[in-house]
Amino acid sequence: MRRIGFVVEEPSDEKIISEIVRRLGVQPDMRVVRGKNDRKIRVFAEMLLEGGCEKVVVVKDGDCLELEDVEEERNKIRSRLGLQGVEVCVVVDEIEAWLLADEKAISNYVGSSLQEFGDPERIKKPSEELNRIFRGVGRSYLKGGEDPREVAKRLDLERLAERCRCFAEFKRLVAC
């Protein structure tokens, strides 16, 4: 199994990405920055590369960034980091958009049918949308709990790649 390092912003990102990349045949070595500190990201990326990871993928939330601006943001981050062997994936708004791309995975986990969402990458504050869905079945979406991991376990990765361009790019970065 390939070993790739990942630097993410939040524990929920770690849970979602860990589940996804294992299904892609990758043993993840994860570091959580807990924020947007480029210096910490760089230090963690260097540690992962020095620790034997074949490459590092930095995953950052776009935080209300428009889909059309993702490439420019990714290039800025890559330039600021200035490290060989490090790729950057910018997720439009937040990684929970990936979960919203597969309503069947969410339905399976919460035990209630959902309609298909429009373009999940156009939904502002996807974690709030997930919380709205979960409240509809009498609970809350616990971003810091196991909900992100449990929904991610159920994702149809092909459907996710079809519906989220940022995930398709992430999958390409992991596969290369």
Image (spheres, rainbow, N blue to C red):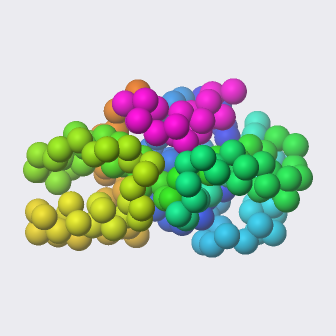
Q: Which residues are magenta?
A: 159-176
Magenta run includes residue 125: no
Quadrant in the rendering for residue 101: top left
Q: Nearer the viewer, residue 41 or 170?
A: 170
| Residue plotted at (33% across, 67% down) | 128
Is residue 124 found left or right of 174 in the rendered image?
left
Query: Quadrant where the C terminus lies?
Result: top right
Is residue 20 found left or right of 146 in the rendered image?
right
Is residue 72 found left or right of 91 in the rendered image?
right
| Residue plotted at (46% across, 39% down) | 164
Quadrant in the rendering for residue 129: bottom left
Q: Is residue 152 visible?
A: no
Q: Is residue 140 visible?
A: yes
| Residue plotted at (41% across, 35% down) | 163
Magenta run includes residue 168: yes
| Residue plotted at (49% across, 59% down) | 94
Q: Horizontal and vertical percent for residue 4?
A: 67, 40
Q: Horizontal and vertical percent for residue 19?
A: 44, 44
